[in-house]
Image (cartoon, helix red, strand yellow):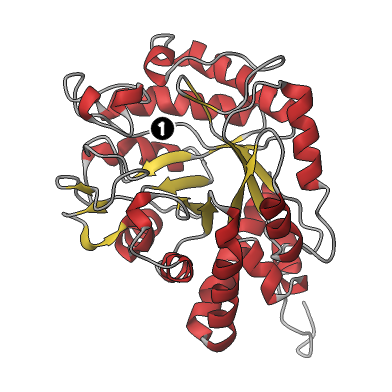
Amino acid sequence: MPSPSAAPATSAPTAAEQQLAALSLEQRVGQLFMVAAKATGAEPGTMQALREYHTGNVYLSGRSKAGSAATAGVVSSLTGTVSSATTGGVPLFVATDQEGGYVQVLSGPGFSTIPTALVQAGAGQAKLRADAAIWGKELRSAGVNVNLAPVLDTVTSPEFAPSNAPIGHFQREYGYAPGTVSTLGNAFADGMKDAGVAPVVKHFPGLGRVVPNTDVTSDVRDTSTTRNDPALEPFHAAITSGTQWVMVSNAYYDKIDPANIAPFSPTVMDTMLRADAGFTGIVLSDDLCSAAQLEAWSDADRALNFFGAGGTMLVCADPASIPAMHQAVVKKAATDASFRAKVDTAALTVLRVKAGQ
């Protein structure tokens, strides 16, 4: 038995907790952003975000037909910015949009031509998982470790699909019933995991019932999805299976939180994802920098609203927005203890997921 004077046992800090303790506030905030880099070669604004604003994550955007070797070179130019001064030595998450069909950023030698989700679905669960593992290995070979896919939105019917601008119009759906979408969309996710690429399921709590696209239209609203909607099933299944990334849509949900777009809604992010679904990973925004749905808010307010409502990582398609966003978050965290706690919790979540990658 230990002597009465023995100190009580304390658990040693995890690797992620040790990393967090070593980071400055500016570096912690940098871990909460994912900035766009053109897949054909990063522009100066992206490099500035990585070098001067400690941005800890990047995604390849646009389209590149240059192939795997050229893409690996672009990725190397990005990951080469990692240092004690930039990210505190913490590696970058490098993502892209490799769904297939109309949404495939990377093509050319070394990359398969991936069909739309609707066509992928026809392969069946086992074949789709095997195919996705091949596509994931192609991404890994180029240095990409996160795929902003699959789409787990359930479009209400084949008849409605052409009117559903963000998803059905482009055949990004895996089917028209939540069970079908869950089985097939998560087969894609599992194949990515098999290849060592983290899948990002999107767009919670679903874009399968809207008409306009939040990228190009403002005040996009879903008027029917509820907090306990059957269409949430594919997302819940993904979370149960260990998926560490969920992207939140930019729409309003009138029956959930009519006053706030989803990335500004504690109900969507804290209540539905954290409490209801038990999600402990990265709550990722959709693009908050260039989407028309966000045009009413300043860059600073977009970031403050997202992190204040419980978001973990903010996707920004326009590197020029990063300075104002980063500075606003640092400034508020330095003077507001409750906001600082949210920043630290989000940064620890990012570091924990990176440690397990």
Q: Nearer the viewer, residue 31 or 17?
A: 31
Q: Position of residue 84 (x, y in %)?
A: 85, 64
Horizontal arrangement in the rendering, residue 104 relative to residue 265 (left or right): right
Q: Is residue 37 left or right of residue 87?
A: left
Which residue sits at x=14%, y=45%? 224
Q: Is residue 163 left or right of residue 102?
A: left
Q: Which of the two residues, 94 or 136, is positioned nearer the viewer here? A: 94
Secondary structure state at the residue bearing disc 1: loop
Vertical relation: 8 (above or below) 254: below
Read off the residue under disc 1. Answer: 151
Q: Is residue 349 above or below residue 75?
A: below
Q: Quadrant of the C terminus?
A: top right
Instruction: Residue at 59% x, 85% y: name it.
Output: 334
Mark 1 surroundings within 10 Å by alpha-carbon count, few (fewer than 14), some (14 through 19), many (20 or more): many
Picture residue at 72% right of the left edge, 52% below the top: 44
Q: Give the residue type at disc 1.
A: Val
Asked if residue 345 shows in the view, the reply is no
Q: x and y percent of residue 333 in the render?
A: 56, 80
Q: Say left or right for 190 vs 296.
A: right
Question: What residue is drawn where x is 60% and y is 76%?
Answer: 330
Residue 354: x %, y % from top left: 68, 51
